[in-house]
Image: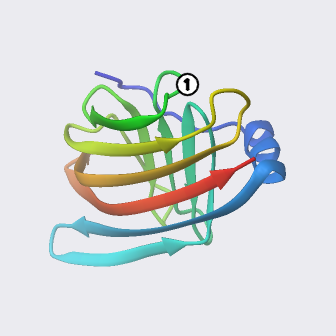
Amino acid sequence: MSTKLFRVEDEALQDARVRAQSGDAFVLVLAPGKFRFFSTKEVLGFLSWTAVLGAGQERIDLDYGHDVPNGLHEFEARGRRVTYRAPDGKDYFGPTEGKIFLEVERPPTGTAFTHKGNFLNVRFESDGNTVVLNGGYKLSSS
């Protein structure tokens, strides 16, 4: 299980911004006794990672572990390098359960791609707090 904080480095984000064509995300964030929606138009990535960047500090960083090939993929969230940063700046990482679904479209050569992903009950627990993510994201890059 991944117990380390994962954050896409600023240099990689800047490189991805240059290639980004479009991106959006809509995620339901559940915490005990409350819920809210996290939506953004800034979703960046590369063949092996995705960063969903919200207003202020809120963000989701995902590392797929390798360049993901064409097709439909299902990942167990547990053991995956995923970090959610809440609006208050608290980091949640090392998900304990849930799934990440990813559809990848890319040509046989080059680095252009489209990722369409979904979070299904991706649960984080930290210091007695629980956060669950459900929702989707899409990004296209040249």
Residue 103 quadrant: top left
Q: How is the image coloured?
A: rainbow
What residue is pinned by disc 1? 67
Q: Amino acid at mark 1?
A: Asp
* Residue lying at 73% horizontally and 60% vertically, measured from the top left: 21
x, y (%) of residue 119?
31, 53
Q: In this image, 141 relative to 135: left or right?
A: right
x, y (%) of residue 48?
56, 30
* Residue lying at 75% horizontally and 47% vertically, measured from the top left: 142
x, y (%) of residue 12?
75, 37
* Residue lying at 33% horizontally and 78% vertically, measured from the top left: 36
- Give the secondary structure at mark 1: loop
Residue 38 quadrant: bottom left
x, y (%) of residue 44?
64, 52
Q: Nearer the viewer, residue 36 or 63?
A: 63
- Quadrant placement of the N terminus: top left
* Residue lying at 38% horizontally and 61% vertically, measured from the top left: 136
Residue 33 quadrant: bottom left
Q: Nearer the viewer, residue 67 or 5?
A: 67
